Image (cartoon, rainbow, N blue to C red):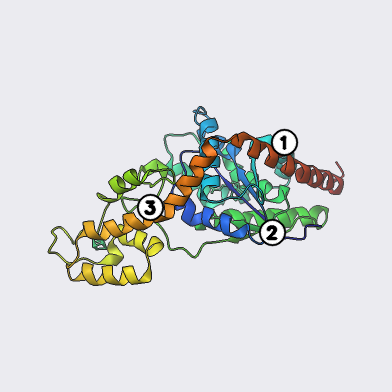
Amino acid sequence: MNQKKIVMSGVRPTGLPHLGNWAGAFKNWVDLQEDYQCYYSIVDWHALTSEYQNTKNIRPDVRNVLLDMLGVGIDPERSVVFLQSEIKEIAELFLLFAMFTPLGWLERVPTFKEQQKELKEKDLNTIGFLGYPLLQTIDIIIVRANIVPVGEDQVSHLELAREIVRRFNNLYGNYFPEPIEFLTPIPKLPGLDGRKMSKSYDNTICLSDSAETVDKKIRPMKTDTRRMRRSDPGVPDDCPAFDFHKCFSSEEERKEIVAGCTTASIGCIDCKKILIKNLNNLLDPFRERRKKYESMPVEDILESGIKKTREVAKQTIAEARELMKI
Ligand code: TRP
Ligand code: SF4
């Protein structure tokens, strides 16, 4: 019997995964494989909640996301990697849970109004978009997961997931575990322009970027504005490039940079060269593994993960229906 605790997480197939995805989630996904039974889902229904008007990129993005997941070291021998929309049990459980999930709970999730404001060009006044965190809850509980490695921005969704689980357990009997979030200790990583790293701001470093591209993107990236000239000293804590150093450079390197930056004895390009070297050292093994998988039938990996997830999901549905007397 497999008594390992269950880990579950998901990634939306909307654009190429970037360093922010790695720092916020993928790194933990890889590490947790050691000690837990992990389920990692490519959540194409979640992509649809905001991309329903333009769906042509979703399928190619599923493949890109899958290749990057394998590239960073998700091991399909140990972890179950699957495609959300292939698990129809998720849709069924979502419908059952929609019956007793209060509208107010969903309306109060901060990301609901935030995202509507941020993505004004899209009409996100839909049942699907309002239901996003409920669907995420179902992703988690369909495999009865205990631990959910996500970025900080997802904490409100996990709080809601626990409330919804408690509601089911009170109404029909204690069945689902209350999932807890698992956050990375990695400091927050901004984008190249200092705003949040996000594909919609076009300020990302993609995990699939070549070494040359990383170089081209980092060189002009935003720095502390006090360093207009080479001779002006800067404040690393006000510099997005230094935020990158906090994530990807050694303590020793950071000490040298702080000393050099505050006394103007090191130029920004020298400082960024250290960063470029460290980023490429991190990304090189990912690139190599990704390349290997690119020539393999990765669809088979998904297919096998789908089969395994279905088995668990079928059991969950059967037991939930029994408890609900449906
Ligand atoms: N909402 C998550 C995000 O934007 C993606 C997601 C969907 C997810 N379903 C999930 C994360 C289940 C964890 C567990 O990052
Ligand atoms: Fe930023 Fe480095 Fe330039 Fe200082 S030297 S402003 S830390 S890029």
Comparing 244 with 279, the one in front is: 279
Residue 283 located left or right of residue 170? left
Question: Which mark is first along the chain, 2 or 1?
Answer: 1
**Residue 140 image position (x, y, % from top left):** 67, 50
Tell me what residue is drawn at x 68 percent, y 46 percent: 138
Q: Is mark 1 within 8 Å of ligand 1?
A: no
Residue 210 located left or right of residue 128? left
Type of amino acid under label 3:
Asn
Residue ID for mark 1? 88
Using the numbered discs, state the Cα–Cα distance from disc 3 to disc 1 in whole angstroms.
Answer: 40 Å
Type of amino acid under label 2:
Asn
Using the numbered discs, state the Cα–Cα distance from disc 1 to disc 2 in whole angstroms.
Answer: 22 Å
Local packing at callout 1 (Cα closer than 10 Å; few below 14, some 14-19, many 20+) is few
Q: Is mark 3 within 8 Å of ligand 2?
A: no
SS class, disc 2: loop
| Residue contact at pointers 3 and 1, CB within 8 angstroms | no
Residue 42 located left or right of residue 289? right
Residue ID for mark 3? 280
> Residue 146 got which mark?
2
**Residue 62 image position (x, y, % from top left):** 55, 36
Tell me what residue is drawn at x 40 percent, y 41 percent: 200
Tell me what residue is drawn at x 30 percent, y 48 percent: 215
Type of amino acid under label 1:
Lys
Using the numbered discs, state the Cα–Cα distance from disc 2 to disc 3 in whole angstroms.
Answer: 34 Å
Question: Which mark is first along the chain, 3 or 2?
Answer: 2
Tell me what residue is drawn at x 43 percent, y 40 percent: 119
Can you tell which of label 3 and label 1 is closer to the viewer?
3
SS class, disc 3: helix
Quick one: quadrant of the N terminus? bottom right
